Image (cartoon, grey):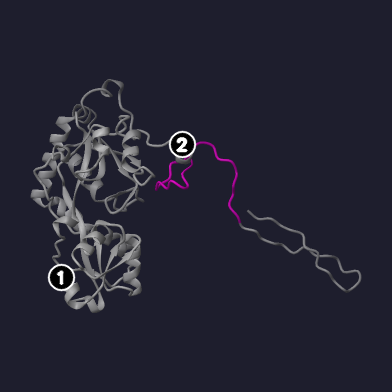
Amino acid sequence: MIIVAAHAVAQEAPGKVFELEPEYVYGKDRRPQIGYRKPEVFEPLSDRLYQSGYRNFAPTAIPDELKTVPAMERVEKMKRILACADAWFWPFSRTAHNNEPPGIEIEILQAIAKRHGWDVSIAWVNTGMRFGVGVTFGTSVDKGICDIFLGLTITNDDHHMPKHKMAFTKAFMSTGYVLVSQGPAKDMKTLDDARTMDMKVGVPAYSPMSEYADEHDIPHATFFQNYQVIDALIKGQVNAAMMWSGSISQAKLEHPEAEFEMVKDYQPPDEMRFDNAWGIKEKEVELLKFIDEEFDAMVKSGETKRICDRYGVPFFPPLAPGATNALEK
């Protein structure tokens, strides 16, 4: 948009005509727009539809005759898996630009669907809201928007699951806190080495890892969140850290200058590993059984590990591969 403003050019010489000096102001054309244009990447702070209150909507139309049938029957007849996933849970799931990877769990779901000739529809949700997963269950799975909820970690004290009559699938992998090092700490292989070398390890404050470090007398420095541990490494405030294994991929993406590397073949202590699974309504026994079998096959064939490798995320086998529902423990 160009605005021409009149500036009087004062001239001392008598009889000189004032001249107009153009001034260019560049701005956004804010003419009214009709309708809603779905953004290529979902950003909650700028998406007008989301901000207006229209959230967690069904990703695809479900025929009336299939709305009340068992979930496995719905999947088979629609030839489509309906899932809910967090739009900002990289590297496990995210809304993505064209030709960008969608995340580990989205690829796992796509691989399962492809084997059976099905499609996948994702309803994007936000599990990072104030009351977390429990609220998101109520506005997604409970309303029949999706049959599978991605991005969960199996914990024995997950109070959201019974309230919403949800069950965990088997774990498809585990994640955990892994040791990364750089510079003077390059020779560090275990947390015991931190004591021997008198080298402080950066850990996220108020996390299971900081509690573990306290209990085992590991010299450490705490930082408020995981990303601040990464910043401390980049600034050289610490030369070793225990990071959530899923964050390594993001750290390398955002900080290509980073020198730290995960200690080769490092295995987190069992106390610092957590099984990753999906959530399904506990009444949907056939769908639960189906997903469990698919997970087993993908872990056995190495397909899950290959997907993780592409994202730079270390693959750790499930801690409890035989447990289909942590609520039974």
User: Foreground mark, 2 or 1?
Assistant: 1
Front-lying residue, 1 or 83: 83
Q: Up-down: is 7 above or below 85?
A: below
Q: Can residue 244 be seen in this view?
A: no
Q: Residue type at mark 2? A: Gly
> Which SS does the magenta portion mostly show?
loop
Q: Is residue 38 magenta?
A: yes
Residue 53 badge: 2
* Residue with the most extreme bottom position: 184
Instruction: Say whether disc 2 or disc 1 marks the residue closer to the N-terminus.
Output: 2
Residue 192 badge: 1
**Residue 202 figure quarter:** bottom left
Front-lying residue, 201 or 8: 201
* Residue with the most extreme top position: 65
Measured as percent of width and height from the top left, residue 232 is found at 34, 69
**Residue at 46% of width from left, 36% of height from top?**
53
Front-lying residue, 2 or 323: 323
Measured as percent of width and height from the top left, residue 270 is found at 14, 56
Which residues are drawn in magenta? 27-49
Q: How crowded is mark 1: few (under 14 residues within 10 Å), some or many (20 or more)?
A: some
Q: What element carries label 2?
A: loop
Q: Can residue 175 be seen in this view?
A: yes
Q: In which quadrant of the rendered image does the C terminus lie?
A: top left
Q: What element carries label 1?
A: helix
Question: Looking at the image, how many numbered discs can be counted on the residues?
Answer: 2
Front-lying residue, 18 or 287: 287
Q: Up-down: is 287 above or below 222?
A: above
Q: Distance between the residues labelled 2 and 1?
A: 51 Å
Q: Is residue 94 magenta?
A: no
